[in-house]
Structures are given as structure tokens and as C-alpha cells.
Amino acid sequence: MSVLTSDGATLRAFADSVLRAAEENAEEVVPVILAVTGGILTEAEPGSIALQDAEDGPGLLWATFADRRMVFRYNSMTAMVELRDGRTDGNPFRLFGRRALPMDIVNFFGGLRAERRR
């Protein structure tokens, strides 16, 4: 079940749950989760951000970008944030981890901004 609060509060809850789950890898995960949540807050359609409970770890974060519903999930096995387009299963559309360059993350969310303007 999704719980919708303010976008900022929802993102904070997601980030907190990821950082608790990533305790062993916190120094790798902190910059990634800051960049990803910042990109979501900046580029997601206002009011579209919702956190869904997950049985096996941090919740799933849903957000809409340019009319596309996407879900972000932290994978504690890989210490990466996985992004899927419209579904929770299958291969991730995009991975965000410690090896992601900051410009890669900026370019990804900037591309979503460009899609929104079309």
C-alpha cells in the first residue's frame, strides 16, 4: 500500500530507510542516495512521490517523470539503487551506485526534464 505525504517527507523517509539498510556500506551509499533523492525532488512531478512498504528491506519509492511512473528500490546485496520503469520486477532500467559519476546522475535526471518539456 502506498502512503503519500509531502514529497520532501516521503523522500526523507526513503533515504532514512536506505541508510539504515546500508549501514555497512554507508560511506558508499550516502553520496548516491543524496544525489538520487535530489534528482527525484527536482524532476518528479509534484505530488507524485509515494513510498510503498516492502517486506524485504527499505520501501519502494514511486515517482512520475514526464508521465512515466518509475520505482526506485535499494538493493542491499549490491548497495545500489535500482530504477524500474512502471514495474517492480524484472531487470532494472538504471542502476545508481558508488561507481556512478555525479555527471551521469545529473544527465539522467536532466534527460527526464527534457522529456517533460516535449
Image (cartoon, rainbow, N blue to C red):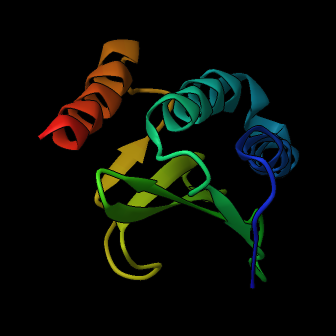
> Is 12 situated left or right of 91 in this image?
right
Residue at 31% from the left image edge and 62% from the top image edge: 68
Q: Position of residue 87 (x, y in %)?
A: 40, 79
Which is more toward the observer, 30 or 43? Answer: 43
The relative height of residue 7 versus residue 36 in the rendered view (above or below) is below
Q: Position of residue 88 (x, y in %)?
A: 47, 78
Answer left or right for 111 relative to 30.
left
- Outermost residue, left side: 118
Which residue is at a point 76% across and 50% down the rendered structure image?
A: 14
Q: Nearer the viewer, residue 28 or 104?
A: 104
| Quadrant assignment for the N terminus | bottom right
How far across and down, in percent of the image, does residue 17 sit? Answer: 83, 52
Identify which residue, 12 or 91, lies in the foreground: 12
Q: Is residue 104 left or right of residue 89?
A: left
Residue at the spot x=88%, y=47% of the render?
A: 20
The percent coordinates of residue 104 (x first, y second) are 29, 23
The C terminus sits in image quarter: top left
Judge whether 71 appears above or below 2 on screen: above
Which residue lies at the image location 31% right of the left edge and 71% below the top edge? 91
**Rendered image quadrant of residue 53:** bottom right
Report the number of numbered marks.
Answer: 0
Q: Nearer the viewer, residue 95 or 86?
A: 86
Among all residues in the image, which is located at the extreme top?
103
Q: Quadrant of residue 52?
A: bottom right
